[in-house]
Image: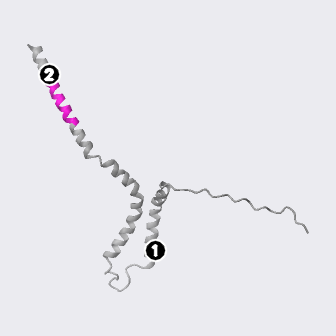
Amino acid sequence: MASAQISEEKRRLIEESERYRHAMGAELQNLKAATAWVPKTIGIVRATSPILALATPLVGLLMRRKKHAELKHDRNGKPKKGLAATALFLFEVMRKARPFWETFRRSRPRHVETSKISKPLARPTSVRK
């Protein structure tokens, strides 16, 4: 009797395990379908990240200027930013953007044309008088 009860318990556990296995398979298919966009998005982000890294400070600069266009002067009538401060700011932005720019330039394939090597000009070996 005990062996019949154990075998009944085993059969029930095997059936339950099989149901869970099928449910997990269905969930895995749902997960694959829900995340199918991830590889394509990662590829797009990798391709555009150098451009975005270069464009972000410039977009921020343009947005900031548009936002504060009416506040050109401080209370004492002097301009908020001078030409030197703007030049230093642009220098700093370009210094930070240079590594991204170099990476972007290296990652893009280029078509290099082989230049025609011109023949050296013949030099006179002796001069006749």
Q: Is residue 11 magenta?
A: yes
The quadrant in which residue 122 appears is bottom right
> Residue 128, position in %: x, y?
90, 66
Mark 1 residue type: Ala
Crowding around mark 2 (Cα neighbors within 10 Å: few <14, some 14 to 19, many 20+) is few
In the image: residue 24, left or right of residue 55? left
Crowding around mark 1 (Cα neighbors within 10 Å: few <14, some 14 to 19, many 20+) is few
Out of 108 and 58, give the one closest to the viewer.
108
Q: Is residue 60 magenta?
A: no
Look at 20% across and 33% down and name the residue there. 22
Quadrant showing the N terminus: top left
Most extreme residue toward the bottom is 77
Look at 41% across and 61% down and name the residue there. 51
Mark 2 residue type: Arg
Most extreme residue toward the left is 1
Specify start and end residues of the magenta stretch as a single range: 9-25
Residue that mark 1 sits on: 87
Residue that mark 2 sits on: 11
